[in-house]
Image (cartoon, helix red, strand yellow):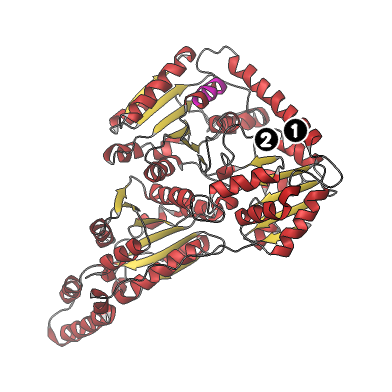
Amino acid sequence: MDGGELVARTLAAHGVAHLFTLCGGHISPILVGAKRRGIRVVDVRHEADAVFAADAVARLTGRPGVAAVTAGPGVTNTITAVKNAQLAQSPVLVLGGATATMLKGRGALQDIDQMALMAPHVKWAVVAERVRDLPETVATALRVAAAGVPGPVFVECPVDLLYPRELVAEWYGAASGRGLAGRALGWYLRRHVGRLFKGAARWEAAEIAAPQPVEPLAPGRRSVARVAARLRRARRPVLVIGNQAMLHAGDPGSAASADRLAAAVGSLGVPAYLASTARGLLGVDHPLQLRHARSKALREADLVILAGYPADFRLDYGRQIPRRATLVAANLSDEQMNLNRRPDLGVLGDPGLFLVALAGAMGEGAGRPEGGEGWGEWFATLRGRDGEREAEIERMAAAPTERVNPVQLCREIDRAMGEDAVVVADGGDFVATAAYTLRPRGPLGWLDPGAFGTLGVGGGFALGAKLCRPQAEVWVLYGDGSVAYSLAEFDTFARHGVPVIAVVGNDAGWTQIAREQVPILGDAVGTTLARTDYHLAAEGYGGKGLLLDRPERTAEVLAEARALAAAGQPVLVNALLSPSEFRQGSISM
């Protein structure tokens, strides 16, 4: 029995199926113990990708994803991914190795104050102090990650808690010296080892208790009833659904599972805009879903319901919603619910459960406001705008180009994707074009970084998504800027048999930045890249690489990529793009 085994037993008792890691001596016992317990240990090429993969698992399953990283630089490398999980409200457990308890602050290898570093970016950060405490500490961390407003947690595991007692005693014994001082030091170190392992033996025979389910915060009935009353009086309602409404969508047993949530939204009959992970909730062609001109719809609405979507920069800090409109906000976080704009009706609770409850409160009155026959005229206006924008997109997709037209490429990807496809979005200009033109196939069929706008999520998100949904096609859409962050994970895909399809929109630049920088400042400095052979790099890492350099070959190359992935090969399509005006003037602040 050692601490690594206790951590692994706890993870297994909580149903953790995958442990993402980059190996290090500080955490080796956790990895070996996890493998012994039937947990699939997936080693990546950068610690950030281990956390990104755990984040994707959390989003797709509704249960915390887990990553283990070694001390010092292993922990520091996770910071961006941890912060992304915090802002996306993803329940993630990061297990961080640490130097031996007696060596902290004495210049040991990779010894830094990890708690000061991690604490601002997680819900809970804790140092395990004794071997016997590891199961309870890890179990508590998993519970905290999922409870309330979900988010990442950090457990620091000193190396001398993880290895067998005999070996730890030998390490400390070697530190003692000769003579009276040496004997005194030896006695002190033996006593320290005794404290570390005191009571740990009880876990030899004791079972680790199964976790108690974490119940989401249900919205109050009175609050739901008040919203229902306002909705019945509305003439131009708009519903915006964000990440937080999807927290339990991946759990088929949840009251806010994807099927129940989609049915509730369908029952309400309100024009709906789906954001971030909520994209795909209603499938491809649901009559309630609108895709374009959201800001104009919000400005004309008389009732706006924000379900798990704060009034941040994506809604122009609430300025897109007129003061004359009734604003309803349902959120697990009081701070997020009141961010920048205090709602007329605030509902503190799980937004997914709120929508299900609201549909129940509306009953047969859903879609038929008081004194009217429905929102048909309002729908006609919104759908007319959608149709105009779709026609414009089709015209831009048909424009002849020397290389590949990015709009046409996105249209072809949309036609090629399987019915079970999951799309991972990692990039700026090209990926934003895809966000307007691709239609996610179903619930949790679209993964993007969220509010933090992080580049580099692609490799980790794709890894986690494919492991959670092994039968699904997983497409990673990269810009040629973002692909460099996780291109090395093609090695991980190849070694672990994870056949994802990556498409790189290669326009030789950081185009989203250049679109504003060059006209305003008159200089392209820092925004120019080369048309690098990313497909050859993927080949070098053990995957398959395809070059798409002529628009007429688009469908052919995408079909070949799908066939390679179906045969078990990770594949990267390097698409050489021509310039496009599709995203002109799109910078966000």
Mark 1 surroundings: few (<14), some (14-19) or many (≥20) residues within 10 A = many
The foreground one among 393 and 467 is 467
Q: Which residue is mark 2?
A: 290
Compared to residue 238, the image places residue 169 above or below, namely below
Q: Which residue is mark 1?
A: 382
The foreground one among 164 and 344 is 344
Compared to residue 563, the image places residue 142 above or below, namely below
For the residues labelled 2 and 1, the Cα–Cα distance comes to 7 Å
Looking at the rendered structure, the secondary structure element under dot 1 is helix
Per the picture, the main secondary structure of the magenta-coloured stretch is helix
Q: Amino acid at mark 1?
A: Leu
Q: Is residue 331 magenta?
A: no
Q: Is residue 408 magenta?
A: yes
Q: Image check: 426 left or right of 270? A: left
Q: Amino acid at mark 2?
A: Leu
Residue 271 x %, y % = 71, 40
